[in-house]
Image (cartoon, rainbow, N blue to C red):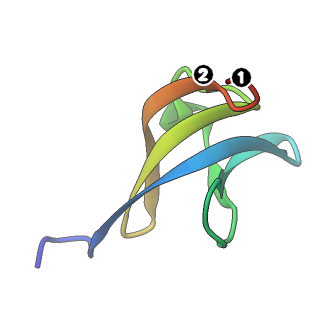
């Protein structure tokens, strides 16, 4: 097994969370994962993204654009 635990990848919406933002799973049930500005990259609140979680670290690995667009 790789160091840091298993890697999990899922599609999420970036939502506001207090003074920051969090990744909320878009198609499955799950908890919101707090995201720092550094780990979000170019993603903004309202975007649909792919998030990779390894251990306790979550990073946006792809940004698809606004979640409400077709």
Answer few, some or many: residues within 10 Å of disc 1's Cα (few below 14, many 20 plus, some between 14 and 19). Answer: few
Q: Is residue 19 left or right of residue 38?
A: right
Q: Position of residue 54 (x, y in %)?
A: 34, 63
Question: How many numbered circles does the render carry?
Answer: 2
Q: Is residue 30 above or below residue 70?
A: below
Q: Is residue 1 above or below residue 33?
A: below
Q: Image point 76% across, 29% down: which residue?
A: 68
Answer few, some or many: residues within 10 Å of disc 2's Cα (few below 14, many 20 plus, some between 14 and 19). Answer: some
Q: Position of residue 12 (x, y in %)?
A: 59, 49
Q: Quadrant of the N terminus?
A: bottom left
Farthest left residue in view: 1
**Alpha carbon of mark 1 to alpha carbon of mark 2: how far?**
8 Å
Q: Position of residue 34 (x, y in %)?
A: 66, 55
Q: Is residue 18 above or below residue 27?
A: above
Farthest right residue in view: 18
Q: Closest to the observer: 37 or 44?
A: 44
Farthest front residue in view: 70
Q: Image point 68% across, 26% down: which residue?
A: 44
Q: Image point 67% across, 24% down: which residue?
A: 70
State which quadrant residue 28 falls in: bottom right
Q: Closest to the observer: 19 or 59?
A: 59
Residue that mark 2 sits on: 65
Residue that mark 1 sits on: 69
* Of labels 1 and 2, the one closer to you: 1
Would you say the residues marked 1 and 2 are in contact, meaning their CB atoms lie under 8 Å apart? yes
Q: Is residue 64 left or right of residue 55?
A: right
Q: Image point 68% across, 70% down: which residue?
A: 31
Q: Secondary structure at mark 1?
A: loop
Q: Is residue 48 left or right of residue 21?
A: left
Q: Secondary structure at mark 2?
A: strand
Q: Position of residue 69 (x, y in %)?
A: 71, 23
């Amino acid at each position: 097994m790789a160091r840091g635990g298993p890697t999990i990848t899922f599609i999420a919406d970036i939502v506001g969370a207090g003074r920051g933002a969090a990744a909320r799973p878009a198609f499955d049930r799950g908890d919101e994962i707090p995201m720092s500005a550094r780990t979000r990259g170019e993603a903004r609140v309202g975007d649909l993204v792919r998030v990779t979680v390894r251990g306790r670290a979550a990073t946006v690995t792809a940004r698809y654009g606004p979640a409400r667009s077709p």
